[in-house]
């Protein structure tokens, strides 16, 4: 994964909002699912990996793809495509994982492709657009407008609330 600062991200000018950010902005790990760019705060990310063997979990919610062994810990794998209501896509053997911590447990978010680490200035932040699908609105905190399109910021705690 390559580190990229705001100057190298093709950032477009945007509106100023009330987003609280320290210093030059907030840093995100980016990834793609169904050609849509997403980001999660780098502070939430524990690991980036390519899951080799995902063991199915009987009677689990549909978004739970299974579990993996990550350095001796059992980690639940969440299929982000399924969680967001998207059609099946990338082959499981090509999917990547973003491991995050939630309520003291590790979860790996299964995504199509890992992007960069980007630092984005708060003036590019916007609230969730009213046109954003209702299922997505529930698990996002907002968007950043970039030259290459919107980067949707996922709210990890809400994304992992599968109840």
Image (cartoon, rainbow, N blue to C red):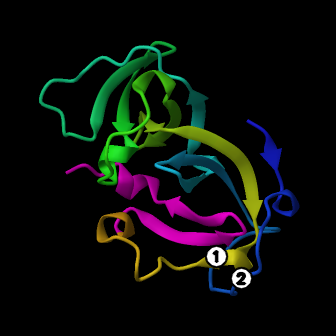
Asked whether, in this view, residue 112 is left or right of residue 131, the answer is right
- Farthest residue, direction right: 7
Horizontally, residue 53 falls left or right of residue 45, namely left
Q: Where is residue 100 in the image (x, y as percent from the top left)?
A: 50, 40
Residue 67 picture location, percent across and down: 34, 23
Mark 1: give few (<14), some (14-19) or many (20+) Cα within 10 Å. many
Vertical comparison of 9 with 12: above or below: above
Compared across the picture, whether 19 is left or right of 105 comes to: right
Query: In the rendered structure, does residue 139 fall within the stretch colored magenta?
Result: yes
Labels 2 and 1 touching (C-beta < 8 A): yes
Look at the picture and state if 141 lies above or below 107. below
Q: Is residue 134 magenta?
A: no
**Magenta segment, which residues?**
138-163
Secondary element under disc 1, as helix, strand or loop, is strand
**Element type at mark 2:** loop
What residue is at 45 percent from the left and 53 percent from the top?
156
Q: What's the residue at 34%, 54% (across, down)?
A: 84
Q: In which quarter of the image is the N terminus?
A: top right
Q: Nearer the viewer, residue 81 or 121?
A: 81
């Amino acid at each position: 994964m390559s580190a990229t600062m705001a100057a190298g991200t093709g950032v477009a000018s945007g509106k100023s909002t009330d987003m609280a950010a320290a210093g030059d902005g907030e840093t995100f790990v980016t990834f793609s699912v169904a050609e849509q760019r997403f980001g999660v705060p780098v502070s939430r990310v524990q690991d980036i990996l390519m899951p080799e063997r995902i063991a199915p979990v009987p009677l689990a919610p549909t978004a739970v793809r299974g579990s993996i062994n990550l350095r001796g810990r059992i980690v639940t794998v969440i299929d982000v495509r399924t969680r967001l209501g998207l059609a099946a896509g990338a082959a499981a053997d090509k999917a990547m994982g973003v491991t995050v911590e939630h309520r003291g447990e590790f979860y790996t978010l299964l995504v199509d492709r890992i992007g960069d680490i980007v630092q984005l200035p708060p003036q590019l932040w916007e609230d969730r657009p009213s046109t954003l699908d209702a299922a997505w609105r529930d698990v996002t905190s907002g968007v950043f407008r970039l030259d290459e399109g919107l980067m949707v910021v996922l709210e990890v705690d809400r994304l992992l609330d599968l109840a």
